[in-house]
DNA sequence: AACCTGACTCGCC
DNA sequence: AGGCGAGCCAGGT
């Protein structure tokens, strides 16, 4: 079980209609500083369509600008499709849709 | 085999 | 209040 695998496992636990920050995912892995690794893990994304990488956003709720599996706005579209609301074009309403507690992996 | 870099976050200055 | 460096892991050069 590599750190990347843990990242994927944690991200898969994010319930539909909610989002989690890189920091929360990293925290679920046991080390908040792994946030950067989380981003890189999703960057390689070995299982597109299986790993809901669109539910992972930055700490302030802004979607990653480097998100590119169909266009930066694609991520926003997917989230809206799940019922997640935005405070503007690129910021998720963290106050209501950020997952409260992510299960430790 | 070592070094650089990358979807982040937090703590100092 | 805003900018910069450090810490984490894996893969490519």
Image: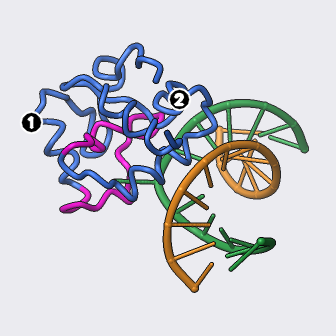
Chain colours: A blue, B green, C orange
On the rendered structure, is A75 left or right of A45? left
**For this rendering, which residue is in front, A35 or A72?**
A35
- Residue A71 % position (x, y): 21, 62
Q: Earlier in the sequence, mark 2 or mark 1?
A: 2
SS for callout 2: loop
Chain letter for mark 2: A
Q: Against B6, is A26 above or below?
A: above
User: Badge 1: how crowded within 10 Å, few (<14), some, or many (20+)?
Assistant: few
Residue lying furthest left in this view? A81
Q: Against A27, is A33 above or below?
A: below
Chain letter for mark 1: A
On the rendered structure, is A56 left or right of A88? right
The quarter of the picture where residue B1 lies is bottom right
Q: Does the segment drawn in magenta span residue A53?
A: yes
Q: Main secondary structure of the magenta part?
A: loop
The label nearer to you, 2 versus 1, is 2
The quarter of the picture where residue B3 lies is bottom right
SS for callout 1: helix
Residue A29 badge: 2
Q: Does mark 1 fall on the same chain as mark 2? A: yes
Magenta segment: A50-72
**For this rendering, which residue is in front, A42 or A92?**
A42
Q: Does the segment drawn in magenta span residue A48?
A: no
- Residue C7 % position (x, y): 76, 43
Q: Against A25, is A101 above or below?
A: above
Q: Residue at x 21, y 43 (%)?
A: A50
User: Badge 2: how crowded within 10 Å, few (<14), some, or many (20+)?
Assistant: many
Residue A81 badge: 1
Q: Residue at x 29, y 17 (%)?
A: A96
């Amino acid at each position: 079980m590599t750190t990347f695998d843990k990242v994927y496992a944690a991200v898969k636990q994010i319930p539909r209609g909610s989002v989690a920050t890189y920091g929360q995912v990293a925290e679920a892995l046991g080390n908040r500083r792994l946030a950067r690794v989380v981003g890189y893990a999703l960057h390689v994304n070995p299982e597109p369509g299986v790993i809901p990488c669109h539910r992972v956003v930055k700490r302030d709720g802004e979607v990653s600008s480097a998100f590119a599996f169909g266009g930066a706005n694609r991520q926003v579209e997917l989230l809206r499709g799940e019922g997640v609301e935005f405070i503007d074009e690129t910021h998720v309403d963290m106050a209501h849709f950020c997952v409260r507690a992510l299960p430790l992996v």
